[in-house]
Every structure is written in C-alpha cells, then in structure tokens.
Amino acid sequence: MSTTPVNTPTIVLVGHGMVGQRFLEALAEQGTTATSRVVVLCEEPRPAYDRVKLTSYFDGKTPDDLSMVEDGFMERHGIELYVDDPAVSVDRAARQVTSRSGRTFTYDALVLATGSYPFVPPVPGKDAHGCFVYRTIEDLLAIEEFAKTSRTGAVVGGGLLGLEAAGALKGLGLETHIVEFAPRLMPVQVDEGGGAALLRTIEDMGLVVHTGTGTQEVVTADGSVTAMRLSDGTELATDMVVFSAGVRPRDQLARDCGLDVGERGGIAVDELCRTSDPAVYAIGECALAADGRVYGLVAPGYEMAQTAAAAIAEQEAKEFTGADLSTKLKLLGVDVASFGDAHGAAEGSLDVVYSDSRSGIYKKLVVDAQGVLLGGVLVGDADAYGMLRPLTGTVPPVAPEQLVLPAGAGAPVALGPSALPDDAVICSCHNVTKHAITQCTSLPEVKKCTKAGTGCGSCVKLIGQLLPAPADSGLCACFSYTRSELYEIIRTLRLTSFAELLDSHGREAARGGDGCEICKPTVASILASLQSGYILDGEQAALQDTNDHFLANMQRNGSYSVVPRIPGGEVTPEKLIVIGEVARDFGLYTKITGGQRIDLFGARVDQLPAIWTRLVDAGFESGHAYGKSLRTVKSCVGQTWCRYGVQDSVKMAIQLELRYRGLRSPHKLKSAVSGCARECAEAQSKDFGVIATASGWNLYVGGNGGATPRHADLLAQDLSDAELVRLIDRFLMFYIRTADRLERTSVWLERLEGGLEHLRDVVVHNSLGLCDELEAMMAAHVDAYEDEWAATLDDPDRLRRFVSFVNAPDTPDPSVRFVPERDQIKPDLTPLTLSPSAPALEGTLAR
Amino acid sequence: MTPQTLRPTAARPTLQLAHADDAWLTVCEESRLTPGRGMAALLPDGRQAALFLDRKGRAYAIDNRDPFTGAQVLARGLLGTADGRPFVASPLLKQRFDLETGRCLDDEEVAVAVYPVRTVQED
Ligand code: SRM
Ligand SMILES: Cc1cc2nc3c(=O)[nH]c(=O)nc-3n(C[C@H](O)[C@H](O)[C@H](O)COP(=O)(O)OP(=O)(O)OC[C@H]3O[C@@H](n4cnc5c(N)ncnc54)[C@H](O)[C@@H]3O)c2cc1C
Ligand code: SF4
Ligand code: FES
C-alpha cells in the first residue's frame, strides 16, 4: 500500500474525533507532518466536528458549522484521511492496521483516539424503534426526524449529557421527561444543594424530572416504544427514549490485539500516553490515564494529544499525569460550574454556601482550615467561575463569603484579574497560565502562540482584561492618526487623494507605499463623504474593498449577491415580478432579507452588468448592501392601513431612505420608522429610529442589533417632518465626522464624552455652532447623489472591470459552480476544496 | 489577444507571465490594470493567476486561489505595503499574502505560488 520512500515514518491515527483532530494539529505545529506520512482512519461519515457543541445543531448550526477541520488543513499538511472507514484490526507483530474496506497500513506509530460509546442499560426493549443515543451528528439527525411524529420524549440520565438531550427534545416541541437514578440532577458535578437549585429552574421550564428512580423496561407495541416502566412502578407514556446514562471507553480494538486495558475499561497508558506496546498510543476518552482515571472531558484529551504528538516526534513532551475536571456549562440556559474539590472530599474541608432557591442560585466554596480555596459549585450564576478557578489552591485575597455573595449584599468585591497568581490557569481548554498570556500583547497573538481562547471561548473575556490596552491609537500600520483625525486633516487641507495623504501624513515608513487594507477603504469612505459623486474612478478605484469595487457582496465561493433598493420595504407587484424574472433567468438563489428587501445570490462577476441592466431598466437602484453606507429604512405599514397607526410611517421611511441612500459613513447605517408606539418596525434597534406620536415623531439614536445589541436613546420628541429630517441630517454628519473606523453609532455614542447630553447640545442646541455646516454637507450629498449602478452601466470604461479573466473576457470562472438545494441553488464547495490541476501540495511551503 | 497583422502606431507596455518553465504568456496591456488593484488571468492549464500593479507601476503575479477558502478571488483583494513589501489582502477573510514570495503574512505555514511577470513593449 505504502507509496512513500522507505525512510519516511508512518503515523496512523484511528479515530478522527475532537482529540484526534487536536493531535493532527499538534503534529502539524511541531513540523512532524512534513517529515512523516500521516494516515487517519475515521469511522464517521464526516471529518472531526465539535461534539461539545453538538446540541447547537438544534439551534440552527449545520454540520458544516460544527466542523473542527479548517478548510484545506488536510491538503496543506499532506494528511491522508479516510472517512467512513474504521479500523477493524491491528496486527502488532507486523505493525499493521486494517480498515473495514480492506486498506492496510504499516505503522511506525499507531495512535488510538476512538473516544467513547454511550452506555445503554440492558433493560428490555432498549433496541425498540424509537430508542436513541446522543453522541454523533447522525444520532441527532435521527432524533430530529423521529421527533416530527412524536409528542412525548423521555431521557434516561440526568447528567450533563442527559440535560442537553432533554433541552433538545424540549426544543423540538416534545413534552419532555428526565429520569435520573441518583437522588439529584448532575450528580457528578454538583452537590445536593446545587442539584436542588438546578431542579427548580429546570422544572420551571416545564420539564418533568424523576430523580431517585431507575428505568426498568422500555414498553413496546409492534416493536415501537409506547412507554417506560420506572423502578418505582410508574409507567410513563412516551413516544421516544433517549439513553444518556454515561459513556464507556471504546477499547475493543485494543482488547482484540492484546493491549492492557483497565478493569472497568479504558486503554491503559503511561505519562507519555503510551500503551503496553510502546509503538501504540491512546489519547482522549478511550484512554485510562496514568493516574487511573478515564477523562470524559475534552480539555484533558487535548493535553493528551499534545503529549502524544511530542512523544512520537521524540520532542520534549509534557507528561500527562491527570487533569482538572473543572467545567462551566450553560445547560438549558442555566449556568452550572464546578471546579477543584467540588464535593469537599478532602479531610477537614469546610464549606461557605450561599443559596437562594427563589432565583435558582446556589454557590458553594470549599476551603481548608488555613483558608486555601479547594473547589466549589456554582449554579444559576457562574460569573465568578473565571476568577475562582485559577485561585484554586491559593488563599484568595478576600474572604470567601465575599466571593459568593451576590452584588448588593454586603460589600461586593470585584476581584480584578491582577489578583491572580502567575501560574493560575486562565484557559482550561488548552491549559494556559496567566504568565503565558501576559507574554503576549494582543488577543490574536494569544490565540496564535498559546491557543488560549480557541476552545470553548469562555476565557476570552478574562484574557482581554489581562492584556495591555493598545498604546498606539493610530488607524493602522500606515497612519498614527485615528479616523476622525484623518477626516479633519482631509477636510481642512482639502486633500483629494490617498497618495497625497499617505505621503504627507502617513507614518514615516509607510510613505511612498501603497497603504494597506485598513486605511485604503477608510480614506476612500472619508473622501466619498466629503466630495460625493461617483466613487470608483481614478485612484479611488484602487482604494475600495472588493464589494464596493464591484458594487455587490462577495460570497464564500467568489460569486456575488445583488440587492436592489426597496425603499421602506414598499414594492409594486410589477417590480416584484421583475425581480422574480431576473432571478429566474440568471438562476439566482432568492431570499427575503432581514432588512425588508430581496437578496439575489450566486451571480458571477461577469453577469453583474447584465443583471443590473434589467434591474435599472425596471426602475431599481443599488441597495448599497456592499457599502459602509445606508442600508435600509424599515417601515411598518402605519396609519394608512393599520388601526393603531397615528402617522404615515411608510411615506416617512421612503423619504428618509431616498434622502440618505448612498451616504458613505464609518460603518453601515440602518433605520426604521414605526407608525405608533407598538413599534412593529423595531426602530429602537436602529442607528436612527423614528416612532410616530399623535403630534409628530420621536427620534431615537444609537440603537444596534447584531452581536452587542443596544436600545436606542430618545434624542428629541414630537418633531414635525421638517424638524425630524433636519435633526437626522445633523446627527448623521456629526457621526460621520467624529466616529472611528467601523464604529457603529451605538459604540460611538457610548464613547462620546458627555454621551447623549453632549450629542443633544451639539445637534439640537447647536453648542458648537456646527449645525449650519452639518446641514450644508448633507444638502451637498443629497444634490450629488446618483445611482452607482446606472452610472456604471452608462460607461464602457467602468464596465471593463466586470470580467472573470482579463485575458479571456468571455470565459466564465469555472470554479464558481452551484448545486441544487430546496428548489434553488447553493455554492458547490467541492471545486474549492480541490487544489487546481497543479501539484498536490500547491499552497504548502516546502520546509 | 496578441496583435498579429495590426500595426499600432506606438509601442504599448504589455504584461507577460511565466506559468510553465519557459513559456511567457501574453496576458494584457498594462493599462488594463489600475495601480493598487488586481485582475485575474486564466492560464492554459486551467489554473488562475492574480495579476497586480502597485503604485510605482511594478507588476506582480501570484496564484489566484485563496488557500483559506479555496475560492479563486485573490485578484480582487486590496494591495498594500507592509514593512516596505507589497502584499494583497484576501477579499474574503482578509489574510495577507506577500506578492514577491507568496507567503501568507498571517499564517507562516501557508503560501501561494508566485509567477514571474515582465513588461514588454508590444508593437
Ligand atoms: C442578507 C442579510 C441576512 C438575511 O438574509 O436576512 C445580512 C447579511 C449580511 N450581514 Fe447582516 N444581514 C442582514 C440583516 C442584518 C440585520 C437585521 C436588520 O438590518 O434589520 C442585522 C442586525 C441589525 C443591526 O445591524 O444592528 C445584521 C447585523 C449584521 C452585523 C452585526 C452588526 C453589529 O453592529 O454588530 C454584521 C457584521 C458587520 O457589519 O460587521 C453583518 C454582516 C452581514 C454581511 C455583510 C456579512 C458579510 O460580510 O458577508 C452579510 C452580507 C450579505 C450579502 O452578501 O448580501 N450583519 N444584519 C440581511 C440583509 C438586510 C438588508 O436587506 O440589507
Ligand atoms: C452532547 C455532548 C456534549 C458534551 N459537552 C461537553 C462539554 O461541555 N465539555 C467537555 O469537556 N466535554 C463535553 N463532551 C464530551 C466531549 O465531546 C468528549 O470528551 C470528546 O469528544 C472526546 O474526544 P475524543 O476524540 O476522545 O472522542 P470522540 O470525539 O468521540 O471521537 C472518537 C472518534 O473515533 C471514532 N472511532 C471509534 N472507533 C473507531 C475505529 N475503530 N476506527 C476509526 N474510528 C473510530 C468514533 O466514531 C469517533 O468519531 C460532550 C459530549 C457530548 C456527546
Ligand atoms: S407600529 Fe403601530 S402603526 Fe405600525 S403596524 Fe405596528 S401597530 Fe400598526
Ligand atoms: S477555557 Fe475554553 S477556550 Fe479557554
């Protein structure tokens, strides 16, 4: 089988789960992939994915989203991956592994990362139609399908996984029961008090919990589940059963080839993760670590992966002698954390407990007689976890009760991260200490050098607090000025070119150069806001991001989306038909956006002019979905039709959208107009939002949806139409003038010294005497507006850039392909994963 | 594409790139490129090159395929200068590639192929 030169060692990995993938990354990082042949046998039909986040599939994550393998990783490192082809036997004497399809590989090192299988108690009926386990994406797909025709579901097991499974069933709309043998939920992680707090919260969500009782039998009729009989005699009618009663290490392959396994399972390994045969390693959940434990969490598995990778390459390996079992989870929306000696097992340990069963909060710290923090349990409010876990093993700088009391009770203490000792572990996924983090100066650097923050992400906030605030507030490596300073420089010196600005005001080393991907679009935006007019000619053409350059949004496969403006969301049937016809004729994927308009996806760059010719002819204009500029002004139907409406919200929304369309700004701008205080247009989540009152309009500013939502602030009340428009003019121009790059109005308003009061002084009370100027600038914008797409289509020179290839203008890009999905198209990603016809390792540096 | 019987009045700078060992492929007139931006070119073997002109008028060519996403888009990225060296930032996830060596500036394990380019006076 082997085609590589005889002296290239072969490493075979069996199992491509979370730990297996981490192992491959470790090999790549330490350079072993360049010197060895690496073969992976993967049982599942897809490469490694994030099992920890499995349940997020039910929140809309696709299997692709869950993938843990970066695009092109295997190709870049020349790793051979065989999916859907598990190892079936190992011949240790010949050092050969055989796969189900009959492939054999001779190994120099064999690594078993086979994980666990769900334990299903041997009760009658356990294999009936309607019984499931909860471990793989395939399991979830099957559960989802079956749930469509079910009303009730029961989960066997009230541990971490059981609660996740129960949450999923509940989310699928089933009446959900949890059956747990132990007297409380999550018996491994939390103590009795914590279990009680958890129980209350979970029952409040409408789940039915049965603790202290086992499952005796799955009752069936015609081979399908109908009920579950519990050990206390109750019969629980149910359509489906999900077993989540713990996991067992998958050690069969190891047993079959005579490797040592533990009494209760698990492949026995030493501190370097070597099994009883030194050429064979075992890592992750299948391994019985040197400390005699099998770890069912991913973080210890990652440590083992690092250890084994280093040991195989004969590099200095950090011995794996055991790991911390601390966890912080959000189960069914409840924070649960436990760390260190959570159950107070150490002799002479003492408790400090705070419990509030009304709000489902329970916190316990375990300390010893000298005040050393040994561990703890937090349920309902686990904010302190990030601080407490690294303090474990030390005497905390403040009294323990201070650490568990809620804010407002007694004197709350906010312990700063500076209080942490240097060896405190900040990222438990990758076992990174405070010391290692403080060697770095930025989050990207931390992630790159230590991997901290790249696992579950729960430590990122703490990492941020440990890093120095950036000393240089300059825009980028080319300019030491901020965006708003550059704006003033360009405005007062009346500069019109980027090159001129860079050569006169850039950092010394950047002068004469080409700028960078940060300052070019920023300056392009400033030039556009100051001088209006067509933004894509001459030097400005070279400054715009690709989206602005092609007046469309680039998608993941290099195709573009097309968004015609539909002011206020109002559209005639004729125009709708045109959109439908264009989409049909060009085969575009069509979707209603969250912004009350229609997005057409999948256009090749060379198709854009033809598509827009049709749209412009029908009276459409660019929707600027690509620009840092006004997106949509959403509207509710308002007074014209709605029985509650007090003003014509649609008319106002259209007026505002037409006024501010095309306005270039530091970030995108969104707006909405509601016809009454019921607020159907969600105006209070917009950069500027307008809500009708009986006598006019209220103007709200600084709202934001997105990742950090912010409710807008009321700037002024009961404005007339003209007053409203004038105030928005001033507000927008003041923002454009003073905001930083990519700073939405929400962030800008938070940062503005004096906040809302100051803003009101400037734009309502004219405290800086700027208002006339701001209004004049907006008037200039409105006068100079022209539709960018119409202007582009009118000019053959401007159209020349819309080709896939400069030397073959009539050839479409063959890498942009689509496959069908739900009666439309979606990008075909396969041509993208293949390297071009070039040598197999195109894209990899020879080491 | 290549002038055959036509006799233009003046010589025009034209870009050529070497994609195989010895063959120079004539791609386009230099004036088709905007300084600071790129254009893609289709090579005879089906690969794609991303051709750029910097502010000083120097031409560069690298493979057009963005190794992070697999999409053929590097020609549509923004050109810039970092520590005195020219780079292009991928329009998708913004990783930067040195135009002279093809090395990715944000991930030292990744690089793209570089093609030699030259400007000739076609007449
Ligand atoms: C198409 C659309 C999703 C949809 O199918 O509905 C969409 C798609 C994108 N959104 Fe959005 N957003 C869309 C409505 C929204 C909304 C809802 C709304 O506008 O009412 C929000 C929350 C409201 C808000 O912005 O405050 C929204 C919050 C974001 C954010 C986060 C902004 C923030 O301040 O946190 C980003 C990222 C960014 O801009 O940096 C983003 C970025 C994007 C980008 C540009 C991501 C990208 O760079 O590729 C997507 C480009 C789409 C394209 O190629 O056409 N999108 N996005 C929606 C287009 C609306 C439209 O007609 O223009
Ligand atoms: C729903 C859920 C939630 C979880 N939440 C958390 C959490 O919040 N925190 C946490 O730390 N952990 C959590 N875990 C546990 C975590 O997922 C595991 O610790 C981790 O996946 C172990 O990694 P592994 O690579 O050892 O095993 P796995 O990820 O299970 O990978 C093993 C792989 O090996 C394959 N395999 C087995 N035998 C063979 C063979 N003979 N040939 C080829 N391939 C084979 C299997 O099919 C599997 O793909 C959760 C698990 C589940 C199911
Ligand atoms: S916001 Fe008021 S006027 Fe507009 S649709 Fe809702 S209820 Fe009607
Ligand atoms: S603790 Fe999970 S990424 Fe750091």
Image (cartoon, coloured by chain):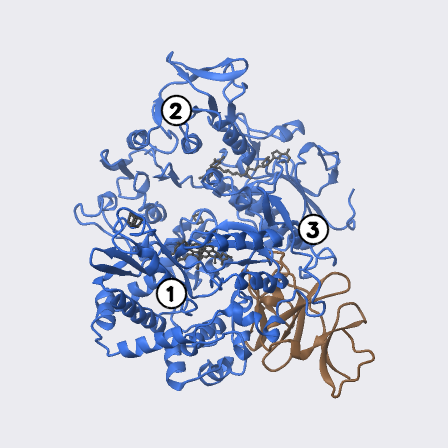
Chain colours: A blue, B brown
Q: Amino acid at mark 2?
A: His
Instruction: Say the numbered circle drawn on residue A499.
Output: none
Q: Which residue is mark 3?
A: A36
The quarter of the image holding the N terminus of chain A is top right
Horizontal and vertical percent position of residue A144: 50, 31
Judge whether A572 appears above or below A621 on screen. above
Q: Is residue A138 left or right of residue A351?
A: right
Point out residue A92 in the picture as x, y percentages from the top left corner. 71, 34
Amino acid type at image mark 1: Glu
Q: Which residue is nearer to you in this view: A229 or A612?
A: A612
**Location of residue A134 in the rendering, given as x and y in whole percent from the top left corner:** 50, 31
Under tag 3, what secondary structure? Answer: loop
Residue A37 or A521: which is nearer the viewer?
Answer: A521
Q: How many marks?
A: 3
Check disc 1 and report its element: helix, strand or loop: loop
Label 3, label 2: how many angstroms apart (C-alpha)?
Answer: 51 Å
Are discs 1 and 3 both within one chain? yes
Q: Which residue is mark 1?
A: A743
Amino acid type, label 3:
Ser
Residue at numbered disc 2:
A177
Q: Chain of mark 1?
A: A
